[in-house]
Image (tube, rainbow, N blue to C red):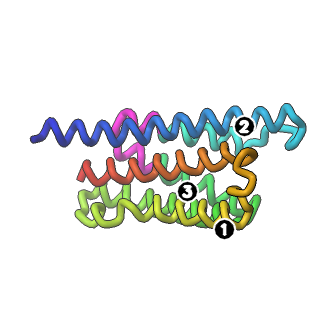
Amino acid sequence: MNKSINRKEFLFALIASLCFIALALISFFEDIWFAKSALLGRVVFMDVVGWLVFAALAVVLFLENKNAFLIAAAVYALMYLINIFRIFDTQILLNFLACLALAAVAFLSCMGHPVVSKLRFVPAALMFLGALIAWISYQYFSGFALYWKTILANLLEIAAVLFAGRWLKETV
């Protein structure tokens, strides 16, 4: 029984890690493409911070270290807090709240609190709500051929947070 629990923990952490790696790669190549095509003109500091945060989350999840994940989740929330001051948007605000919730779930998981099993879906639900509002308000579905990478990145981030929450639940 203990081996199957460890396999489930590893599987959820691995899936979340792969999602964060894919998200980091998509963000990296999209930011470079925008910079080269002169749509944005340059790669800004927060782009690099985003790549590093996604990569750090992937590594920490792959190593299955809850304490390091708590720190990485707090930095993840800080990244979105800084982005709120750069560009205020409903999706960014909800992603910030989702990252705060993820850090809270990680903290509760480190403490061994049983409420983690009930709260593990809150971060992913908040991110999904933010993405859905953005998709509808910016009409992403009407220009799917243009926005499919953004939708894919949103879905990868939601999946990563969902599986990270599931991993945290399994570790309690």
Q: Which region of the structure is painted magenta?
A: 58-71
Depicted 58 relative to depicted 119: above or below: above
Q: Nearer the viewer, mark 3 or mark 2?
A: 2
Q: Secondary structure at mark 2?
A: helix
Mark 1: amino acid: Thr
First of labels 1, 3 by sequence position: 3
Q: Secondary structure at mark 3?
A: helix
Tag 3: residue type?
Answer: Ala
- Percent from the top left, x then y, of residue 12? 34, 42
| Residue bearing the label numbered 2 | 30
**Circle 1 is placed at which residue position?**
90
Q: Split into 4 quadrants, where in the image is the N terminus? A: top left
**Which of label 1 and label 3 is nearer to you?**
1
Disc 1 packing (10 Å; few <14; some 14–19; many ≥20):
some
Residue for badge 3? 77
Place residue 152 in its image quadrant: top right
Locate residue 85: give its quadrant.
Answer: bottom right
